[in-house]
Amino acid sequence: MIVLQDVPESLTVSGEHEVQRSFRAVIVDELPFSETLQESGYTIEVFRQGETVEVLSVPASWVKVLPEVWGKSEISEIVAS
């Protein structure tokens, strides 16, 4: 994903900044429509060199979701004993 604007009081800055190129982010959760913000949003986890830098909640209009998949998705089954 690309962050489209700087997130206040955060290390996360828009994709136009040089520092942003060293960060990666993934969507952790989708947030429902908010009367205050008048839009839905996302909780995102921001990484630098594989380490979590911060977890943020941002309005959907602040990010551009890309079709890229980071890492490998695995599904496991839990069997009750």
Image (tube, rainbow, N blue to C red):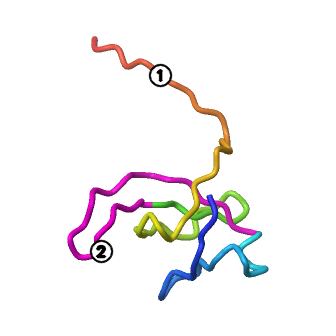
**Residue 37 covered by magenta stretch:** yes
The residue where tag 2 is placed is 37
Q: Is residue 1 left or right of residue 57?
A: right
Q: Which image quarter: residue 48?
A: bottom right
Q: Is residue 41 left or right of residue 13?
A: left
Question: In which quadrant is the N terminus drawn?
Answer: bottom right
Q: Which residues are magenta?
A: 22-43
User: Of the residues shown, which amino acid type is indicated by label 2?
Assistant: Leu
Q: Who's the residue at 58% across and 61% down the image?
A: 64
Question: In which quadrant is the C terminus drawn?
Answer: top left
20 vs 81, nearest the viewer: 20
User: Of the residues shown, which amino acid type is indicated by label 1?
Assistant: Ser
Give how far across and how far down residue 49 sits, in percent. 73, 62
Give how far across and how far down residue 17 sits, in percent. 73, 81
Badge 1 crowding class, 10 Å Cα cut-off, few under 14, some 14 to 19, many 20 or more, is few
Q: Which image quarter: residue 80?
A: top left
SS class of the residue under badge 1?
loop
The residue where tag 1 is placed is 76
SS class of the residue under badge 2?
loop
- Cα separation, mark 1 vs mark 2, equals 37 Å
Q: Who's the residue at 68% across and 45% down the image?
A: 68
Give how far across and how far down residue 51 sits, in percent. 64, 61
Q: Relative to 37, say whether 30 is above or below.
A: above
The majority secondary structure of the magenta stretch comes to: strand
Q: Who's the residue at 57% across and 82% down the image?
A: 6
Mark 1 / mark 2, whichever is N-terminal: 2
Badge 2 crowding class, 10 Å Cα cut-off, few under 14, some 14 to 19, many 20 or more, is few
| Name of the residue lying farthest toward the front | 38
Q: Relative to 75, say whether 52 is above or below.
A: below
